[in-house]
Amino acid sequence: MSADTHASPSILLVEDDQMDIMNVQRELRKHNIEVPLHIARNGREALSMLRGENGKERIPKPNVVMLDINMPRMNGLELLEALRSDTEFVGLNVFIMTTSDLESDRLKARELAVSGYIIKPLSFDKFGEGGATVDGFSLFLDLLQLKEQPH
């Protein structure tokens, strides 16, 4: 293990659909990305985990947040607004995951400074399809691999 300024890398996945969660887990395994994956079922639960509130144990600050837009209780864009207005979490790398390719969602996500935009169903193999998906996932993989350089 390298002596690193942060804790070891981790991912916070905010997703209410069990199939999508399994999909993400499978893709990470396929690419030998073995980092802790914290799962929140909606935006409110994610905030509780990040802040250690409402009986949730506080998780270490993740390197990457993967965020579904369409969720009950607090959707992805509402969570993103909350993160961007919180000095502790304003700089988090957030990737929006959505089945929606709506321009309005993209614009809103861009206003909120997302790191990337991932169209579901998630697959690292579909690089050629959809412009931002490539950049989003290359960047996503780079962020995770920044921490685990081969020795």
Image (tube, rainbow, N blue to C red):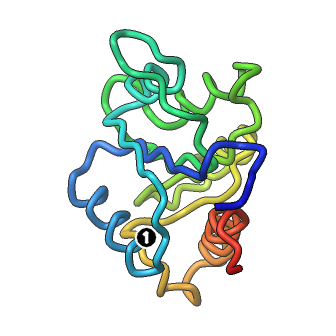
Q: What is the secondary structure assignment of the residue under circle 1?
A: helix
In the rendered image, residue 31, in percent from the top left (x then y), is placed at 47, 80
* Residue pointed to by mark 1: 28
In the rendered image, residue 10, in percent from the top left (x then y), is placed at 54, 50
Q: Quadrant of the N terminus?
A: bottom right
In the rendered image, residue 20, in percent from the top left (x then y), is placed at 30, 59
Count neighbours of disc 1 (C-alpha within 10 A) and say few if under 14, some if 14 to 19, many if 20 or more. Answer: some
Q: Type of residue at label 1?
A: Leu
In the rendered image, residue 112, in percent from the top left (x then y), is placed at 71, 38
Residue 56 vs 112, above or below: the answer is above
Residue 109 vs 30, above or below: the answer is above
Give the residue at x 34% y 64%.
Answer: 25
Q: Quadrant of the C terminus?
A: bottom right
Give the residue at x 68% y 47%.
Answer: 93
Residue 53 vs 92, above or below: the answer is above
Q: Nearer the viewer, residue 125 or 98?
A: 125
